[in-house]
Image (cartoon, grey):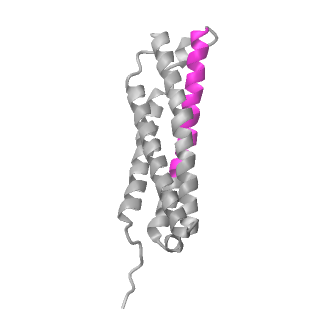
Amino acid sequence: MRKTTLTRTMKFLHVIGSIGFCGALLALLVLHASLPDPEAVAKFAALRMAMGNVAAWVLLPSTGLVVVSGLLAMAMNDRFKSAGWTWAKLASGVLILEGTLVYVQAPMERAAGDALATLEGELDLSSLGATLVSEWASFWVILGVAAVNIVLGVYRPRFSRRVEK
């Protein structure tokens, strides 16, 4: 396969992964906004399990696809290695990856498990709504950094030093 075909393939995969990532975060925001009061255990648990499934089946694979395709695209294209926007995009990508894994993925899976345990009577009802405010903030922060990352990729600003005369 030619280098341009590989580069285009990596770009395509990166865009598809980004769409899946942002779509999954938006779906989590909508589901989170739809959560009933934790006392409505059955409805609350059903939405929490749905959120866990979105995180496990859409968000995590999309995040992996974005990271791998972005790194491969950077490695394959010599122009990307010297562009300042690429390095800024890489730095924000690391923040997105870490934030997604630590502040979204893990809490969503934990909350889904807690909701199921509460339905089965193994866990106290009081622990169900403990992380709702921090989750909401995490979604918005990660979406904001992802938007900056997208802007960097689309507009490709020049980051260079001024040479004083």
Picture residue at 58% right of the left edge, 29% below the top: 109
Magenta extent:
95-120
- Which residue is at the front of the view, 89 or 59? 59
Q: Quadrant of residue 118?
A: top right
Q: Position of residue 53 (x, y in %)?
A: 54, 28
Location of the N terminus by quadrant is bottom right
* Residue 130 counted in the magenta span: no
Q: Compared to 46, does 137 lie above or below?
A: below
Q: Residue furthest bottom?
A: 165
Q: Position of residue 161 (x, y in %)?
A: 41, 78
Q: Compared to 102, does 108 lie above or below?
A: above
Q: Position of residue 69 (x, y in %)?
A: 55, 55
Q: Compared to 3, does 133 lie above or below?
A: above
Q: Residue furthest right?
A: 122
- Which residue is at the front of the view, 157 or 2? 2
Q: Position of residue 146 (x, y in %)?
A: 43, 49
Q: Compared to 41, does 163 lie above or below?
A: below
Picture residue at 44% right of the left edge, 30% below the top: 133
Q: Quadrant of residue 33?
A: top left
Picture residue at 61% right of the left edge, 15% below the top: 117
